[in-house]
Amino acid sequence: MSTVAELWALQTTDLAVEAARQRLTELEKQLGADAELKAARAAAAEAQAELDRCRTTQRQLDQQVKDLSTQVRAAERDLMSGRVRNPRELESMEANVAALRRRRGVLEGEALEAMLEVDQWEAELAARQGRQAAAETAHQARQGAIRREAGQRLAELKTLSARLSQQWEATPPPDRDLYKNLRSRKGGRAVAREQGGACQACGVMLPTGVLQTVHVGSQRVFCPGCGRLLLAG
Ligand SMILES: [Zn+2]
């Protein structure tokens, strides 16, 4: 028959195995997941998209200004060529040149605004890329720490699993059944420690008779509060 202390040791290993497995699962979840980095990458990508958009607009406006200048020069040359002498027609041609110039003036203003916007987004992109780089570095450091801890936990789990199977092999089958049964019904803890006359699992104060039997240790005592096996503290 196993002693209560042996079953307590078995339970300690069991709980440590569970804790190590749980921690490994948590670490696996943390690998790759990084909200801060994701946000930094998204912010940089957004600035890049805005910058591309502004540059396209600026290029289009510059081209339109260039095209208009060509048109203005052609219209001016035509006007000066002396080809047309009719005053009405000349007036209309002058009006056309003036309209083209006005239109060019408006577009030049828009092109200037687009250029300023490009400058702003270039600065913004540089700032956001800087923040992203910092986030990438921090992320790498965190991932490294997670991998290191996962390695340690895995080694720990291996040692614990070996210990657990040794302890399990050393436990007589009836005690295994008792232990398994109690564990499944009592939230994973079959054995409770007594300390200062109280059960550490449920907190109940143990009657004097029960306490004495626990301390003599010659027979198994179950907590009258929670039903777990009691180990003298
Ligand atoms: Zn109890």
Image: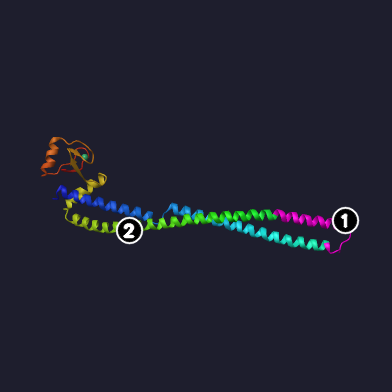
Residue depicted at x 60% and y 54%: 117
Q: Name the kind of residue labelled 2 in the image.
A: Arg
Q: Residues within 10 Å of mark 2 (few under 14, many from 20)?
A: few
In the rendered view, how is the structure colored? Answer: rainbow
SS type, badge 2: helix
Asked where in the image residue 139 lies, by quadrant, the reply is bottom left
Quarter of the C terminus within the rendering: top left
Range shown magenta: 80-106
The reply, left or right, for residue 194 in relation to residue 151 is left
Q: Which numbered mark, 2 or 1, is in the foreground of this view?
A: 1
Asked where in the image residue 222 lies, by quadrant, the reply is top left
SS type, badge 1: helix
- Name the chief secondary structure element in magenta: helix
Q: Is residue 9 magenta?
A: no
Name the spot of residue 116 as percent of width and height, x first.
61, 54
The reply, left or right, for residue 19 in relation to residue 10 is right
The reply, left or right, for residue 109 in relation to residue 192 is right
Residue depicted at x 28% and y 51%: 19
Residue depicted at x 76% and y 60%: 72
Q: Mark number for residue 88? A: 1
Q: Is residue 101 magenta?
A: yes
The total number of labels drawn is 2
Q: Are marks 2 and 1 in contact (CB under 8 Å)?
A: no
Name the spot of residue 172 as percent of width and height, x first.
16, 53
Vertical order, 8 against 137 (above or below): above
Residue that label 2 marks: 148
Q: Residues within 10 Å of mark 1 (few under 14, many from 20)?
A: few
Question: In the orientation shown, which residue stands out farthest toward the right?
Answer: 86
Q: CA distance from mark 2 to mark 1?
A: 88 Å
